[in-house]
């Protein structure tokens, strides 16, 4: 089944919308198919300001209604404690809020941007999606990340080459308490790195220190500008180290 056929059959849906590559294409595809669709975006301490701004602009560009839901994820002690399955509790919190808002607006079907490339064994949030009956049209239609980027480029969506982004909570070691202050420090540090011209990176918090991770294509530049990076981030961390192994995971 193509994504167009999917939305012709399921033509009244709500989309859990982050403004990333997958949810942007999902929203676009639903709108293009003529479905009655509304986007719901959760705003929390786990997302940096630019992600929220991007989501608002994208929904407007696609021409879909967007409802922003403010959510205090850290009020849930299971999430703030940052266990290995934090994503499961967080996804419960987020999808519960979206589903409640969508149903109040008359949308019984809620979809998210999970695609066929996502590994269910590596995503604790998958369990929560099933519990709340969240549909994943991109995955159901067999669309991989590569397929989605290609289709997004053809559609003229600015997200087609947007780096994958994981929430700010992933910068803090599992088992270490998550606080709003730690998230704000991380957001500021990554904003500085972005303004320096780096793209697709992470600034991991290691106690009072920072571990900067960049992709292989940026590793030479990062080491060439190591002193500049250290100076820029020194206000927030005691020590700043660049990871010698270029890698970006969550």
Image (cartoon, rainbow, N blue to C red):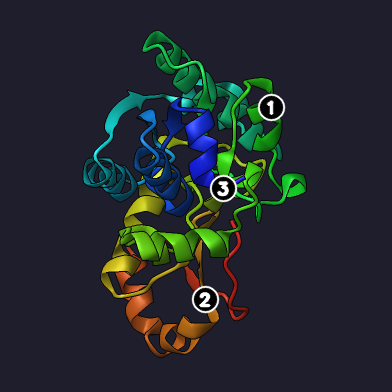
Q: Where is residue 78, by image quadrant?
A: top right
Is 187 left, or right, of 110 in this rendering? Answer: left
* Residue drawn where x is 37% and y is 59% of the image: 159
Q: Position of residue 61 (x, y in %)?
A: 22, 47
* Residue drawn where x is 36% and y is 75% of the image: 229
Which comes before the other along the chain, label 2 or label 1?
1
What element does badge 1 sit on? helix
Picture disc at residue 2: 3
123 or 2, which is in the foreground?
2
Circle 2 crowding by C-alpha within 10 Å: few under 14, some 14–19, many from 20: some
Circle 1 crowding by C-alpha within 10 Å: few under 14, some 14–19, many from 20: few
Q: Where is residue 81, by image quadrant?
A: top right
Q: Where is residue 192, by image quadrant?
A: bottom left
Q: Which residue is mark 2?
A: 215
What element does badge 3 sit on? loop
Q: Is residue 89 above or below residue 220?
A: above
Which comes before the other along the chain, label 1 or label 3?
3
Quadrant of the frame with the C terminus:
bottom right
> For the residues marked 2 and 1, what is the alpha-carbon distance in whole angstroms?
33 Å
* Residue drawn where x is 36% and y is 74% of the image: 198
Q: Position of residue 139 (x, y in %)?
A: 63, 45
Picture disc at residue 130: 1
> For the residues marked 3 and 2, what is the alpha-carbon distance in whole angstroms?
33 Å
């Amino acid at each position: 089944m193509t994504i167009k056929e999917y939305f012709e059959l399921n033509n009244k849906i709500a989309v859990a919308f982050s403004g990333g590559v997958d949810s942007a294409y999902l929203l676009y595809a639903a709108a293009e198919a003529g479905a009655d669709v509304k986007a719901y975006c959760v705003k929390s301490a786990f997302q940096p300001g630019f992600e929220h701004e991007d989501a608002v602009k994208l929904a407007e560009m696609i021409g879909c209604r967007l409802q922003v839901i403010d959510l205090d994820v850290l009020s849930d002690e299971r999430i703030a404690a940052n266990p290995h399955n934090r994503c499961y509790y967080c996804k419960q919190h987020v999808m519960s809020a979206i589903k409640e808002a969508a149903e109040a607006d008359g949308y019984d079907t809620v979809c998210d941007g999970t695609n066929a490339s996502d590994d269910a064994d590596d995503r604790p949030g998958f369990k929560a999606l099933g519990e709340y009956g969240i549909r994943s049209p991109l995955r159901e239609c067999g669309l991989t990340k590569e397929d989605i980027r290609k289709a997004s480029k053809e559609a003229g969506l600015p997200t087609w080459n947007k780096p994958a982004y994981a929430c700010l909570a992933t910068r803090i070691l599992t088992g270490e308490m998550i606080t709003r202050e730690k998230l704000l420090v991380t957001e500021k540090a990554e904003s500085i790195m972005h303004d320096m011209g780096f793209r697709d990176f992470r600034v991991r918090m290691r106690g009072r220190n920072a571990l900067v991770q960049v992709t292989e294509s940026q590793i030479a530049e990062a080491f060439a500008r190591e002193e500049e990076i250290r100076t820029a981030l020194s206000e927030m961390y005691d020590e700043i180290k660049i990871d010698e192994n270029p890698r970006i995971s969550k």
